[in-house]
Image (cartoon, rainbow, N blue to C red):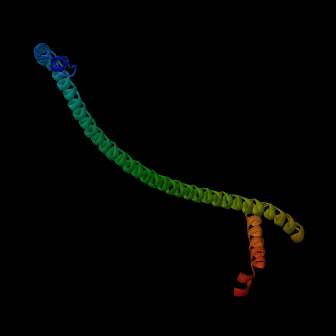
């Protein structure tokens, strides 16, 4: 039984044999060396490239963010300037509008005054013309009446003018009570 025990100990599937251990160690060492010399550098290169790409992406993103912030500041400043300029243009336009309205009002007042003066002058000229025409007609009637009353002809122009003037003066004084009260 002891030999069966020894044989059973030697054939234990859980304990590897020495030849298997040596072949396993040599295979593992060869695999390790190949992996270390060929595969690991490729992984390291890929990791380094990816790290560089990520670093570059982060740096680009930071630069883009800084640029965006700068552009935003510029935009804000330009917008502020544009608003200020628009406000000053509105104020200038209002001032110009007030000046134009005042100028037009002044011109309208001047034109109204000119039209009024022209109308007064025209009315005065028509009044003078009417007075002259009326004097002439009244004078002719007065000469005719005076000729009938006096009984003689007043064909003499000078005499007729004197009679007409006297008659008109009498007529004006009788129509103007303030002048008759002061006499």
Placement of 51 over or under 76, stated as above or below:
above
Percent coordinates x, y for residue 169 in the rendering = 74, 73
Left or right relative to 141: residue 44:
left
Residue most toward the front?
Answer: 1
State left or right for residue 113 relative to residue 25: right
> Residue at 41% of width from left, 52% of height from top?
87
State whether residue 91 is above or below residue 176.
Answer: above
Q: Residue at x 77, y 76 (%)?
A: 170
Counting from the top left corner in percent of width and height, residue 57 is at 25, 30
Judging depth in this view, the residue of 72 and 145 nearest the camera is 72
Inspect this view and state whether residue 183 appears.
Answer: no
Relative to residue 177, is residue 8 drawn left or right?
left
The relative height of residue 100 versus residue 143 in the rendered view (above or below) is above
- Whether residue 134 is visible here, answered yes or no, is yes
On the image, the x and y values in percent for residue 27 come to: 13, 13
Check the picture and name the quadrant holding the N terminus. top left
Question: In which quarter of the view is residue 58 placed?
Answer: top left
Residue at the image point whose x is 14% and y is 19% from the top: 41
Give 142 or 67, whichever is nearer the viewer. 67
């Amino acid at each position: 039984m002891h030999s069966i025990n020894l044989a059973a100990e030697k054939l234990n599937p859980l304990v590897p044999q020495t030849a298997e251990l040596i072949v396993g160690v040599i295979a593992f060492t060869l695999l390790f060396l190949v992996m270390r010399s060929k595969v690991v550098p490729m992984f390291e290169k890929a990791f380094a490239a990816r790290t560089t790409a990520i670093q570059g992406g982060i740096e680009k993103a930071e630069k883009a963010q800084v640029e965006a912030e700068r552009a935003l500041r510029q935009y804000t400043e330009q917008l502020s300037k544009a608003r200020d300029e628009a406000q000053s243009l509105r104020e200038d336009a209002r001032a110009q509008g007030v000046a134009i309205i005042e100028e037009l009002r002044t011109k309208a007042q001047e034109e109204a005054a000119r039209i009024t003066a022209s109308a007064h002058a025209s009315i005065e000229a028509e009044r003078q013309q009417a007075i002259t025409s009326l004097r002439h007609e009244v004078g002719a009637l007065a000469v005719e009446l005076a000729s009938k009353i006096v009984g003689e002809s007043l064909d003499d122009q000078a005499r007729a003018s004197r009679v007409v003037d006297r008659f008109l003066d009498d007529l004006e004084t009788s129509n103007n009570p303030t002048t008759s009260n002061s006499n």
